[in-house]
Image: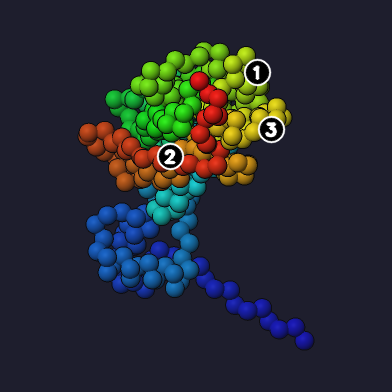
Amino acid sequence: MRRPPAPTREAATIEIVAEQAGVSSKTVSRVINNERGVRTETRERVLAAIEKLDYQPNLAARGLAGARSFLIGLFYDNPGDYLSEFQTGAVQRCRESNLHLMVEPLEAADPELARKVSTLIRQLRLEGVILLPPLSDLSEVRATLAEAGIPAVHIAPMHRQDDAPSVDTDDRAAAQQLTNELIERGHRRIGFMLGRAGHRATEQRYLGFADAMQAHGLAVDPRLVQTGNFEFADGLECARRILSSAERPTAIFASNDDMGAAAVCVARQMDIALPQQLSIVGFDDAPVATMIWPQLSTVRQPVRSMGRVAADLIIQHKPHRRGWPQPMPRPHLDLQVILRGSIAAAPADTP
């Protein structure tokens, strides 16, 4: 004989949570949205009721009731480790305030870029957008968002905007510091692998390298400065050009770790001993930096923290309600030079 089905538990509503916690529905909503002005004791009581009742806020209903979507957009051009880390930090911060992050790929060179951005923000009703480089520097993207009244946070822009906040790091200073590490170990002839043209990181990291060389009275050989576009595949050809020079360098500074890994690969193919005959350093401290041998000396970027901070700017300052606070928020996060086995003293016969 079959047993009758167990009675289903009625889904909790915001009113039921309010009754359980002894507060108003509006107070429950403020706690769910992580708004300020709720006493700690009250907040804890509401959270306990939410957990006990297994209350799941209805995102669509919240949006209809408050004319909000509870969605923040993250627009990017280049997928990879940077995006993954950044997204993790942004998602964590959004979840704390019961918001959702919509990650959308866009091509910076797309002639239809502005139209596609306009379509996205119209369909998704985004409350704010985070722009990763190089999108953070494109005037057509900024103009489209501004026209729609969508606040945007720019990540590592080449040029700061007076009407928009940005989150960045001092890549130039970190690149100078890492180049100094090579020079202090006796390296005088140093190659440099450039990233993608028009990218702020490409410019700033090269400038930091050039700053260090100039400060020590060392000339930069233009034949040893080649472009690898931040890609492993392009980095292979870039490294071959540098290492095929008649006067081979004793060190290479790669603008990111993917290109640094490519330089390690090419050096192995050319039977160049690492790091005895050639030191190689990178930038970003991506997972690949510790997956190769020798492990790559590099600069650690707080990418996950940058994601959290960018999302927090939109969530906490609520520009969709009252505009950005003044002075314009422009958080600046610290970088850290990480020395590993890929760096060593220059060969004894170095001039």
> Mark 3 falls on what kind of element?
helix
Q: Is residue 13 left or right of residue 10?
A: left
**Residue 197 image point, x, y percent:** 51, 19
Q: Residue 151, position in %: x, y?
A: 36, 33
Q: Does residue 182 appear left or right of residue 262 in this picture?
A: left
Q: Residue at x 38, y 67 (%)?
A: 47
Residue that carries the numbered disc 3 in the rendered image: 268
Query: Would you name the residue on which mark 1 appears?
Result: 244
The x, y position of residue 147, in whole percent, is 38, 25
Residue at the location (36% across, 40% down)? 334
Q: Quadrant of residue 330?
A: top left
27 or 179, nearer to the observer: 179
On the image, which quarter does residue 25 sit in? bottom left
- What residue is rendered at 39% in x and 32% in y? 177
Task: Give how far across and how far down residue 76 sits, in percent.
Answer: 52, 32
**Helix, strand or loop status at disc 2:** strand
Q: CA distance from mark 3 to mark 1?
A: 13 Å
Q: Which numbered circle lies on residue 337? A: 2
Relative depth, front residue between 223 and 344? 344
User: For the residue marked with disc 3, what is the amino acid?
Assistant: Arg
Q: Mark 2 and mark 1: span between their CA atoms?
A: 28 Å
Q: Is residue 159 above or below residue 313?
A: above
Image: 334 above or below 5? above
Amino acid type of the residue that numbered disc 2 sits on in the rendered structure: Val
Residue sitting at x 24%, y 64%: 39
